[in-house]
């Protein structure tokens, strides 16, 4: 009798289980479809953004051509071999030097983000002063408002914005501002991302890179050729 009851229960429950499985699969398909729609929308947005970026690049090239100015860049990848961190000094040692034609003042990047500059060069290694060091000061431009400023190191994880104009105070508070190298003084190539202005403190900048997590960095040099 038990055998008959168990087998009958199995046969009776089979359609219900099948329906539950179908419902579960249908739900999974619907979730995948929703994710696909979200990804499709995001891809469309990124393509539109890419078109805008390409347009700006072409405009930039045209303007530089008008003033007979071209920027040539060279890149070198280096490994971080020593991290010299102290309350007053934020620097790293890399395994490339004059052998690879590195020079004092060259910009050092973490992928695309500026993290410092070379301040000492030997034949096979160099020392990099990080943006967070107290002695670090670089000219930047705050976008999208186009305001010139100076980013200074504080010895901590964040930087400080200096020499900004008071009339821009409201615009800084109401917009999300990104700091890029301005290229003033010819020290750094213009347009290198540095950090984002803090919403809690308009004089504070949060750097894009975590200076404690470096393994490899990129050193770039650039020279501006001007015919006129």
Image: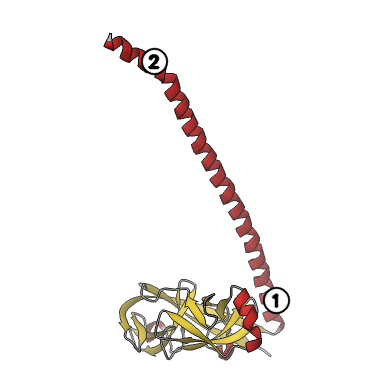
Dot 1 falls on a residue whose secondary structure is: helix
Image mark count: 2
Residues at marks 1 and 2, CA–CA distance in whole angstroms: 76 Å
Q: Which of the 4 quarters of the picture holds residue 186? A: bottom right
Does residue 11 lie above or below 31 as drawn?
A: above
Instruction: Give the colour scheme shown.
Output: secondary structure
Does residue 192 lie above or below 225 as drawn?
A: above
Where is residue 180? Give x, y as percent.
Answer: 56, 79
Residue at horizontal 40 percent and vertical 82 percent from the top: 156
Left or right of 202, for residue 134:
left
Label drawn at residue 11: 2
Mark closer to the chain start, 1 or 2:
2
Residue at horizontal 36 percent and vertical 16 percent from the top: 9
Where is residue 209? Give x, y as percent.
Answer: 44, 73
Residue in front for this viewpoint, 133 or 58: 133
Quarter of the image with the N terminus in it:
top left
Q: Which residue is mark 1?
A: 62
Dot 2 falls on a residue whose secondary structure is: helix
Circle 2 Cα neighbour tier, 10 Å, few/some/many (<14 / 14–19 / ≥20):
few
Q: Which numbered disc, 1 or 2, marks the residue closer to the eye?
A: 2
Where is residue 17? Give x, y as percent.
Answer: 42, 24
Q: Residue furthest left?
A: 2
Residue at horizontal 41 percent and vertical 19 percent from the top: 14
Left or right of 157, for residue 202:
right
């Amino acid at each position: 009798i038990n055998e008959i009851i168990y087998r009958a229960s199995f046969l009776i429950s089979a359609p219900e289980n099948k329906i539950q499985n179908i419902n579960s699969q249908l739900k999974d398909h619907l979730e995948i479809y929703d994710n696909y729609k979200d990804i499709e929308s995001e891809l469309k947005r990124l393509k539109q953004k890419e078109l805008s970026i390409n347009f700006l690049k072409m405009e930039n090239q045209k303007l530089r051509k008008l003033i007979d100015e071209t920027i040539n860049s060279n890149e070198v990848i280096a490994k971080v071999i020593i991290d010299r961190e102290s309350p007053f000094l934020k620097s790293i040692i890399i395994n490339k030097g004059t052998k690879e034609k590195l020079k004092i003042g060259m910009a050092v990047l973490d992928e695309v983000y500026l993290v410092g500059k070379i301040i000492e060069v030997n034949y096979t290694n160099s020392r990099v002063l990080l943006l967070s060091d107290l002695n670090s000061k670089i000219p930047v431009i705050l976008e999208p408002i186009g305001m010139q400023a100076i980013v200074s190191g504080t010895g901590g994880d964040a930087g400080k914005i200096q020499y900004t104009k008071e009339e821009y105070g409201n615009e800084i508070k109401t917009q999300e501002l990104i700091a890029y190298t301005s290229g003033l003084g010819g020290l750094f190539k213009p347009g290198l991302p540095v950090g984002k202005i803090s919403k809690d403190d308009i004089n504070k900048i949060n750097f894009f890179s975590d200076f404690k997590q470096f393994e490899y960095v990129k050193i770039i040099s650039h020279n501006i050729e001007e015919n006129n």
